[in-house]
Image: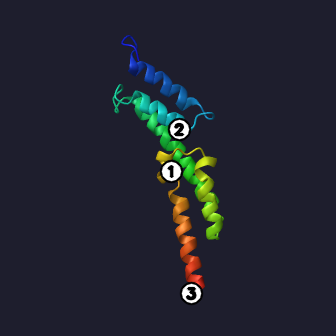
Amino acid sequence: NPAWVNAQEEAAAVSGIINAKEQGVSMGDVLEVIAFYTGTVPESHFSVMTLREKLDEMIVATQEKLQESASGFDSPVDVQALLNGAAATHGVPPSLEERCLVFVRQRLHEVVTRAERDLRK
């Protein structure tokens, strides 16, 4: 940003626009905006906090959708297929995969454990 730009005011305007949008903004977009203002706008500034809250909301919504989908599968193959395509399908950046896919990974562990147990019977 040029010296004459007030980065905090700019960040406030951008965060307000992003937060108001219901569609058309991805987790990657929000991450890029946060990264852009990192080091220029304090982490405690309301604009950065608003962007982080928006990102958290998006992560939780993705987790809920994936958890609902995963709960419908009892086959390790089906859960693994969901896991394999989840990041691309839901626009999850690599840096957020661990957070977004945690419930699918848990479900995969559950169904694999159950399948192994059933095989031993």
Q: Is residue 6 left or right of residue 113?
A: left
Q: Which residue is mark 3?
A: 120
For the N terminus, the image quarter is: top left
Marks counted in the figure total: 3
Q: Amino acid at mark 2?
A: Gly
Q: Position of residue 63 (x, y in %)?
A: 55, 52
Of mark 1 and mark 2, the one earlier in the sequence is 2
Q: Which residue is mark 1?
A: 97
For the C terminus, the image quarter is: bottom right
Q: Amino acid at mark 1?
A: Glu
Within 10 angstroms of label 3, few (less than 14), some, or many (20 or more) residues? Answer: few
Residue 81 appears in the rendering = yes
The residue at the point 40 percent across, 29 percent down is: 46
Circle 1: element type: helix
Q: CA distance from mark 3 to mark 1?
A: 33 Å
Q: Amino acid at mark 3?
A: Arg
Pointer 3 with pointer 2, Cβ within 8 A: no
Q: CA distance from mark 1 to mark 2?
A: 11 Å
Of mark 3 and mark 1, the one earlier in the sequence is 1
Pointer 3 with pointer 1, Cβ within 8 A: no
- Residues 101 and 19: in front is 101
Q: CA distance from mark 3 to mark 2?
A: 44 Å
Circle 3: element type: helix
Residue 71 appears in the rendering = no
The residue at the point 48 percent across, 28 percent down is: 15
Q: Position of residue 19 (x, y in %)?
A: 53, 31
Q: Which residue is mark 2?
A: 28
Farthest residue in the bottom direction? 121
The residue at the point 56 percent across, 60 percent down is: 104
